[in-house]
Image: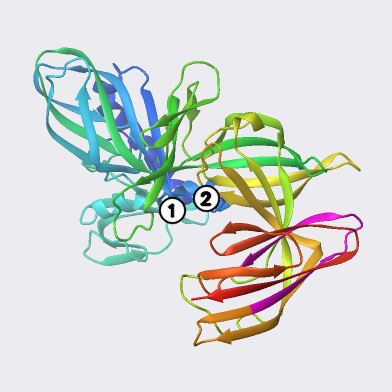
Amino acid sequence: MTLNNEVWRYGKWSALVIMGLVLASQSMLMAQQDSNRPDSQDSITIYSSASPGGVPPGLYLPGAGRYSGQVPGFAMVRHIREYDLTRGISTLRVVDVAAGIDPTTVAFRSLSQPETRVLEQSFEFDLVSTDKLLERYIGQQVIVEQVRGDSIDTVSGELLGTAGGLMLRLADGSVQTLSNYQNVRFPSLPDGLITRPTLLWQLDAPQRGRQQVQIAYQTSGMTWWTDYNLIIDPGQQCRMDLSAWVTLVNQSGAAYRQAKLKLIAGEVNRVQDQNVQYRNVRASAVLAEADSGFSEKSFNEYHLYTLGRPMDLPQNATKQVELFPAVNNARCEQLLVIDGSPRWYAGGRQLSQNITGANELDASIVVQFENTEDNGLGIPLPAGRVRVSQLDEADGNLEFVGEDAIGHTPRKDTVVLNTGVAFDVKAARKQTEFRIDSKARQAWETIEVQVRNRKRESTEVVVNENLFRASGWEITSSSDKYSKINSNTIQYRLSIPADTVKTITYEVHYRW
């Protein structure tokens, strides 16, 4: 199809001018199908391989849509639409699909006439641009305008090349290069160039009339993740408020209006190209009825979160939706945790005397809570980043005190967050005795851990000791009560008064 008026190139705005004029011609081309089609009923399933807390802010800032190939996820999109089809073989052209579509995943089916057959399907993606117009006109006549002072000169000729500027063969046979020019005029729009990715079907319909059809495909450029906000009151009876938000990013090249959305939390395996690093993905989709938030249920071996209302998801947009109503006044525990010995025991023996030496140790700040119904939760929690804040009673402001990432957490599990390092609590660990009897396959070791509390109030400290030298061990003496946590870890829970040093010692007997 040709344009009635010429397409002009105005410096850096030339692409916009060309797109506007070509869009008008493409609208005429698509009018036969689109004029009779009502608004699409869209549903979206978004799969994400975004690491909790690992998505850079630049991914969803303005302009990031140019880099949609970097978005760590994809989506399954379904459109339900109506089209007027003729009896027998006809062609259906659909233009408003995602630019990131994977054409190998496209599926078409008629909901009202299942007998309608797909004979052929194709995907056209040769989108118009200034460079492509110039390339198509190599060997043909164009008109180039140059500004010289207050006047405009025109040069007409056969376009020979575009690298580094324009090269024209003039009417007298001479060749002229133009590195600076204002406008280029083309006599028509070449065939085959389109403004939007287009799906094309050749159909065989049993009868003429309007049919409701479903079009489904996968597209890149969409992802989701979960962000949690936790407000902690770490007093003697630790309490917390927890809210959760799902963040959706759409850089797929299409907008979705009043779409249905679902989120499936779980690790979904997907076969990937060798150049793509995403292996397991997390899923999410759309569903809508009432004006409500997400509801949750088990689905296969995953968890399905269904949004109770339709939502708009524009192109190049980031949206946040509340995952569940905020939980208030839930029980929690804030601990200072010291991990003393190495944690690399792997079933072998580590019998070197000075393998640990004397170590200065930090105390990690740990917040943990039970994900249970009687604690106001009992909700399957999708993987995400948890930001922890605390109220400063002096001015009533919330202050950020740390964050951590959690994996997919089922109900009745304990959530453990490492939010930072304590300033006023430190420890020193040293070996005070070591004996080994290789013939008898035995060893004895005595460990001393000094915990310094320089705070102005007492504090609770947990000391974990990993008994890593051999799988067979026995604590033969200990200054304080301890608990066996697993097959090679013991734990001390200490209450240390203000500005006090607490020393614990223990002897362990290893056999192998």
Say if 257 sits above or below 452 in the image.
above
Whether the residues at callouts 1 and 2 have beta carbons within 8 Å, the answer is yes
* Image location (x, y in percent) of residue 387: 67, 46
Q: Nearer the viewer, residue 288 or 26?
A: 288
Q: Nearer the viewer, residue 377 or 77?
A: 377
As drawn, is 478 to the left or to the right of 185? Answer: right
Q: What's the residue at 45%, 43% (across, down)?
A: 223
Picture quadrant where residue 341 is located: bottom right
Image: magenta residue range? 445-467
The answer to whether one can see residue 1 in this image is no
Picture quadrant where residue 396 is located: top right
Determine whether the residue tagged by mark 1 lies in a helix, strand or loop: helix
* Amino acid type assigned to the residue bearing label 2 in the image: Leu
Label 2 CA crowd tier, 10 Å (few <14, some 14–19, many 20+) = some
As drawn, is 384 to the left or to the right of 498? Answer: left
Say if 302 sits above or below 177 in the image.
above
Picture quadrant where residue 172 is located: bottom left
Say if the magenta span includes residue 357: no
The secondary structure that most of the magenta stretch takes on is strand
As drawn, is 369 to the left or to the right of 479? Answer: left
The answer to whether one can see residue 54 in this image is yes
